[in-house]
Amino acid sequence: MAWPQLFFLHPVSLYQGAAFPFALLFNYLCNMDSFPIPARHFFLLAGGGVLAWAAMGPFAVLVFIPALCAGALICSLGPRDVHRCTFSFQMSWQTLCHLGLHYTEYYLQEPPSERFYITLSSLMLLTQRVTSLSLDIREGKVKAASGGLGSRSSWSEHLCEALPYFSYLLFFPALLGGPLCSFQRFQTRVQGSSSRCPRHSFRALAWRGLQILGLECLTVAVRGVVSAGAGLDDCRQLQCVYAMWATVGFFKLTYYSHWLLDDSLLCAAGFAPAFGESPGEEGYIPDADIWTLETTHRISLFTRKWNQSTARWLRRLIFQRSRAWPVLQTFAFSAWWHGLHPGQVFGFLCWAVMVEADYLIHAFARGVVRSWPARLLYRTLAWVHTQLIIAYVMLAVEVRSLSSLWSLCYSYNSVFPMVYCVLLFLLAKRKHKFD
């Protein structure tokens, strides 16, 4: 999932769990030739509407309106204009909703509704699907609706052409969470029968269930450790390093658990790869690669593997289209997409600087560290430093109050990103000198 506050993730998991029987039912019906393709689209669309209303209440209108408008724009515009218009409309709408959250939190000093947080998270995921589909149309990977809304076709024909787009934007397995599923994979799944046998589906779901259970047990244990020790507000000196590491450990375990739950729901509906299948370049990539995230000594690798489908979406949307400072532009857009809270702006810009420093530091180390004992020591120290910097960034992104952000900046934890900033300055100066 994205970066919204953690306290609403457990209600989301309840709604995701309630959607499991309907996902399994959809998977079962897709194996029946008597279940026509339009009915499959209606099933997914209706399920999305019901789930949105159950989870968000009246705030669901804030998701339905941009989905309908984006679908109308996709059906009426040509391939050259569709991405620019849909991107502008979707980000404008999402920004207005985030400004409403800012107004409630910072001006009115009132806690926003839990359902409003769920709505904003769903809007962020909707933005991913809208922009991914519009890019596919502009690049010719997906054929646009023929004729557009202004053609002489009847309204029933227009609706038949637009139905796959609307069902993709609001299909219930991906409405509240989950990796980004491309429109091509979505269409392939809806138009075809299940390619996996029930035994493989059960094995994949059982394995994910065991992982979720293990992560939840670890989460409970880490929560007990965090609550027993000094908090971030009352810690002193080096004690703040331990408090930061333990708190972010709880955050990460919570995200891993919910990513696996979201992935399981898509798997139950048949949109995830079959057991043992490797997704293609435009296929499906699960968000959680826990082993790599917890063992890597490279901040850049952690960045690519954290919330993998979102990282790949940002790379395609911003990074590959930026002519200057692509890393900085990508992280700046990510802060905008997440809501532009002060902690998010600071955290994502700090993350961008850390990634730039990571490239130079490890490129320099490859030419200096040669013996295997030195490489082992270097990797160990780099791993510790990477985990502490990531913890610092995550904590900055998660905090909502300016006082908590200032406390983090003035704590001993700021030493870790400062070390990388100094190394970035020295190595960039050295590289410029030799160039």
Image (cartoon, grey):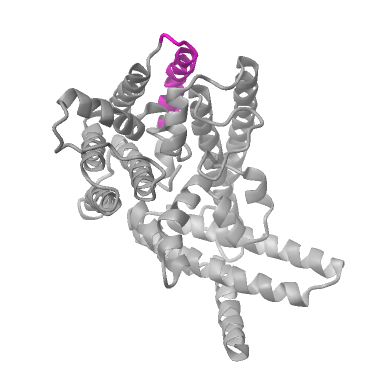
> Is residue 184 highlighted in magenta?
no
Q: Quadrant of residue 44?
A: top left
Q: Position of residue 367 (x, y in %)?
A: 75, 76
* Looking at the image, residue 39 lies above or below residue 233: above
Check residue 33 for magenta coloring. Answer: yes
Res 241 visible: no
In the rendered view, tell whether residue 412 sits above or below residue 38.
Answer: below
Measured as percent of width and height from the top left, residue 185 is found at: 47, 34
Picture quarter containing residue 396?
A: bottom left
Q: Does residue 433 appear left or right of residue 314 in this picture? A: right
Residue at image x 65%, y 22%?
203
State the image coordinates of residue 37 (x, y, percent, origin top left).
37, 19
Residue 219, located in which quarter of the rendered image?
top right
Q: Main secondary structure of the magenta part?
A: helix
Q: Residue at x 39, y 34 (%)?
A: 176
The magenta-colored residue range is 12-34
Q: In the shown orientation, is residue 429 left or right of residue 314?
A: right
